[in-house]
Image (cartoon, rainbow, N blue to C red):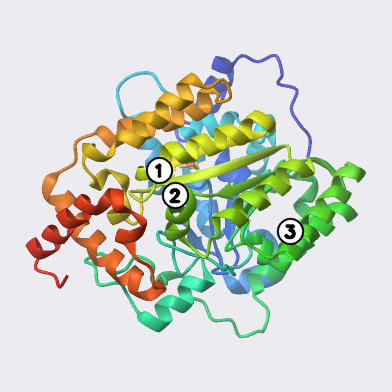
């Protein structure tokens, strides 16, 4: 696929060119895709709800993994200036007063999108397009059962929910398998995975970013197959990325690193980056992410940092009510590591689902560690604006007013969830989170208020 010669064009000219096709035209609908191969779903970009891929079609035409009949209809709408309903996320932003770009523009300007402007137009709504940004979940094999995660994403949680059923909370659908995406295959092998491996050679040279998610990717044979594929098919512009909980056995880490080293020696790809998740320190981090051993996490993180195989290692913090008491300690830990390893990046986002674990169900009396965290970051020379802004944005969100009756309803669910989670995993919330004792009593009161069993 050829690149257009568009280097000298200014940003404004690029935006005008995108809008001239139509005010609802977005290159990401062609250039980016997230595939869940376990459930046979896809979405472009990651904002719209995922939709089902047709099983029979992909067996003969693997291009339909990305270019589904539904997506082609949406592309047609975009080309005709109709706003697709599924892209509400962007229309809401574009309809708010003031000058700002939605992700429609941001993603259309990305280096893996804009250079392919003419190719996208040539493809139109009927053709099949090879994506440049590909995110894939091969399976849900996972050794963790994190408090906020789902049965669809973690095999351990799936097992838990099959054994114990839903949590005794008002929002009991959380963590359960989503019946909408349930699939049972006639054949032994997942047809979407089979189609993917047929499709990969055809799209390989067009890829800029290939990110593997899970489950826990280091437990999936497909992750190692991708690394071997990189070795056998060097692709100089490819930025490969893998998410990991860094809680797998030593031999897997070694196998993974040894393949990465080989890839680096061969200069087979442009770069590799690791995304590792942790949300607090010590026992509190272990409570949030059932299965985590905090010392092992730090040890494995250090191994990756010292291996010099990664362009970047991003520590992803999913900030929930559980992260609040020790967020300052986590920032100190990351600061210490960043001093020796500048390629370590901190990325924080606040937990949205389930709502009853959101950090803003706590009162402002719990904000102290967050204020300290911001002070540490401001004083330190190792955090950049991206990292500080992410943390500051969470603090600003935390301080926004919440509807009291909604908050009490969430606190009631928090109490119900924690008691049950403690029972299922033989934990003791109050021993591990003494800082949240008063808050927990408030939650217990709320539970009575909503007439649920304690
Ligand atoms: S319009 Fe917005 S939501 Fe839709 S694909 Fe583009 S970036 Fe994503």
Position above or below: 436 against 150: above
Can residue 85 be seen here? The reply is yes
| Residue at (68% x, 67% y) in the render | 220
The quarter of the image holding the N terminus is: top right
The percent coordinates of residue 376 (x first, y second) are 45, 26
The percent coordinates of residue 269 (x first, y second) are 82, 43
Q: Nearer the viewer, mark 3 or mark 1?
A: 1
- The mark that comes first in sequence, 3 or 2, is 2
On screen, residue 183 versus residue 219, left or right, reads left
Helix, strand or loop under label 2: loop
Residue nearest the viewer, comparing 298 with 271: 298
Helix, strand or loop under label 1: helix
Position above or below: 54 against 339: below
Inter-mark Cα distance, 3 to 1: 28 Å
Residue topped by disc 1: 326
The quarter of the image holding the C terminus is: bottom left
Q: Nearer the viewer, mark 3 or mark 2?
A: 3
Which image quarter: residue 245? bottom right
- The mark that comes first in sequence, 3 or 1, is 3
Position above or below: 374 against 344: above
Residue nearest the viewer, comparing 322 with 209: 322
Position above or below: 341 against 181: above
Residue topped by disc 3: 253
Inter-mark Cα distance, 3 to 2: 34 Å
Dot 1: within a 10 Å radius of its alpha carbon, few (fewer than 14), some, or many (20 or more) residues?
Answer: many
Quick one: which residue is furthest to the right in this view?
Answer: 266
Which image quarter: residue 267? top right
Disc 2 residue lies near ligand 1 with CB under 8 A: yes
Residue topped by disc 2: 48
């Amino acid at each position: 696929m050829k690149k257009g010669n568009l280097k000298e064009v200014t940003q404004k000219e690029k935006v005008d060119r995108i809008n001239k096709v139509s005010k609802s035209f977005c290159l990401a609908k062609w250039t980016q895709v997230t595939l869940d191969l376990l459930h046979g779903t896809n979405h472009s970009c990651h904002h719209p709800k995922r939709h089902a891929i047709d099983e029979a079609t992909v067996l003969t035409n693997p291009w339909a993994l990305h270019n589904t009949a539904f997506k082609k209809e949406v592309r047609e709408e975009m080309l005709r200036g109709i706003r697709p309903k599924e892209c509400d996320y962007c229309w809401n932003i574009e309809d708010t007063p003031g000058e700002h770009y939605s992700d429609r523009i941001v993603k259309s300007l990305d280096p893996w999108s804009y250079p392919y402007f003419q190719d996208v137009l040539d493809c139109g709504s009927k053709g099949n397009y090879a994506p440049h940004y590909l995110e894939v979940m091969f399976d849900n094999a996972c050794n963790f059962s994190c408090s906020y995660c789902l049965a669809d994403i973690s095999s351990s949680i799936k097992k838990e929910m099959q054994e114990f059923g839903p949590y005794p909370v008002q929002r009991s659908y959380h963590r359960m398998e989503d019946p909408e995406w349930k699939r049972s295959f006639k054949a032994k092998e997942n047809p979407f995975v089979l189609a993917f491996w047929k499709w990969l050679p055809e799209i390989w040279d067009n890829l800029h970013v290939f990110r593997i998610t899970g489950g826990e990717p280091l437990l999936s044979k497909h992750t190692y197959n991708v690394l071997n594929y990189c070795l056998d098919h060097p692709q100089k512009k490819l930025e490969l990325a893998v998410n990991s909980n860094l809680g797998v056995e030593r031999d897997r880490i070694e196998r993974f690193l040894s393949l990465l080293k080989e890839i680096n020696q061969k200069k087979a790809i442009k770069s590799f980056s690791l995304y590792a998740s942790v949300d607090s320190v010590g026992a509190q981090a272990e409570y949030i992410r059932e299965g985590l051993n905090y010392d092992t996490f730090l040890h494995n993180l250090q191994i990756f940092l010292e291996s010099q195989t990664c362009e970047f290692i991003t520590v992803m913090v999913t900030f929930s009510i559980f992260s609040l008491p020790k967020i300052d300690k986590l920032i100190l830990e990351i600061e210490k590591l960043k001093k020796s390893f500048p390629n370590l990046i901190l990325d924080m986002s606040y937990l949205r689902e389930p709502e009853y674990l959101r950090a803003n169900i706590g009162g402002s009396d719990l904000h102290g560690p967050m204020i300290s965290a911001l002070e540490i970051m401001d004083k330190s020379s190792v955090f950049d604006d991206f990292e500080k802004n992410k943390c500051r944005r969470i603090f600003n969100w935390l301080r926004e007013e919440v509807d009291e009756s909604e908050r009490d309803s969430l606190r009631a669910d928090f109490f119900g969830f924690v008691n049950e989670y403690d029972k299922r995993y033989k934990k003791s919330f109050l021993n591990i989170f003494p800082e949240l004792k008063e808050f927990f009593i408030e939650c217990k009161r709320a539970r009575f208020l909503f007439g649920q069993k304690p």
